[in-house]
Image: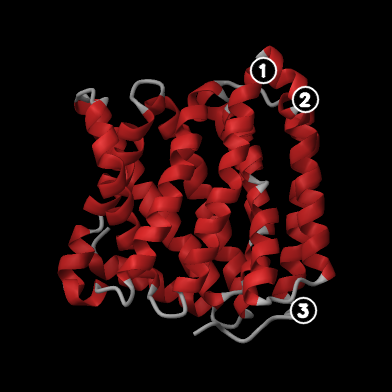
Amino acid sequence: MPRRAWRHARKAVHRRTAHLPPNAQGVLWMVVSGLLFTVLNALVRSLSQQFDPYQTQFLRYFFGLLVLVPWIVHSGPQAFKPQHVGSHFLRGGLHTVGLWMWFSALPQIPLADTTAIGFTGPIFVMLGAYWLFREPMRWERWLATGLGFAGVMVVVWPKLSWSAAMTGSGGGWYHLIMLASSPVFAASFLLTKAQTKFESPRTILVWQCVSISLLSLPAALMHWTHPDLTQWGLFALCGLLGSAGHYCQTRAIHVADVGATQSPKFLELVWAACLGWIAFGDVPSQSTLIGGLIISAATLWVSRREARGKGALSQAP
């Protein structure tokens, strides 16, 4: 997109959303982030069946960094100088561990299930936000998150049972490995929120790509498989989608408190089921449809309450 067109689009979005309370703006940013990550997950799932998990995550974040190079050059490297570089590598380390578990399980689990399991993360995030940041967790947010989590369980509960894991039916072990990545990603997410107090969203985004690329590279080189031209192009697209998604996510938690941004993540299950049906011909199961309806209702309800300014906080610095 030409720079002038991008600037015009950004101003148009700002005009349409500037009147909204900060928490409502955060909800919108998180919805866009969810759409981008759903498409990314579909692409990465295909690539992770062809490459080692560490190589997949390295190339995904390396290309995420490459697509940011024009932005870095235009703004000047000094604009991305971090205040506390150690915090970026701490976050990168946490995210690298979570990504290894996630990428290891991803090829073995349906796209809708992958998305649904990721929704256990908001529970850890909301508890951590209350404990670390003393954010007010109003009953609307707890109720919406509880209903969303119930919708997730409708979808994946049989596959998360211990007996399923022990027998290997439905990829039980892989479901549990992916589930274990949720608290790790939650810790990374909370560290991001802390960083927004002294770092800009663009600095956080760039250094996330730098740290994860560097930390993933040694293991990636040990299991390297040379991609063909099409695969290089798909990794480049993954980098673009991932950087855009993380930028929207960081913007969401920059303008709003963490708790307000968690319930919209449950809509990603709906996006994943629709994408699986359109792109791969996967017909959503009855449990997926029921769970999706519960999730959508909870998300719509809490989003409308946030848009009315119920308990909206002043904008984060």
Q: Quadrant of residue 305?
A: bottom right
Q: Nearer the viewer, mark 3 or mark 1?
A: 1
Q: Which residue is mark 3?
A: 310
Which of pointers 1 and 2 lies earlier in the amino acid sequence? 2
Report crowding for label 1: few under 14, some 14 to 19, many 20 or more residues within 10 A (C-alpha): some
Which amino acid type corresponds to the residue marked 1 in the rendered image? Answer: Gly
Q: Position of residue 308 (x, y in %)?
A: 74, 77
Instruction: Assign a secondary structure to mark 1.
Output: helix
312, above or below 10, in the image? below
The amino acid type found where label 3 is placed reads Lys
For image coordinates 59% across by 83% down, the residue present is 19
At label 2, the amino acid type is Pro
Identify the element where label 3 is drawn: loop
Dot placed on the residue nearer the N-terminal end, 3 or 1: 1
How packed mark 2 is, by other alpha carbons closer than 10 Å (few <14, some 14-19, many 20 or more), is some
Q: CA distance from mark 3 to mark 1?
A: 42 Å
The residue carrying mark 2 is 158
Residue beneath the point at 76% across and 19% down: 163
Left or right of 270, for residue 181: left
Kindly state the secondary structure of the residue where label 2 is placed: helix
Q: Write the residue at 52% across / 42% down.
A: 38
Q: CA distance from mark 1 to mark 2?
A: 9 Å
* Marks 2 and 3, the one that precedes in the sequence: 2
* Residue 221 left/right relative to 179: left
Marks 2 and 1: in contact by CB < 8 Å? yes
Q: How is the image coloured?
A: secondary structure
Q: Which mark is residue 170?
A: 1
- The answer to whether residue 35 of the structure is visible from this angle is yes
Q: Can the viewer see residue 40? A: no
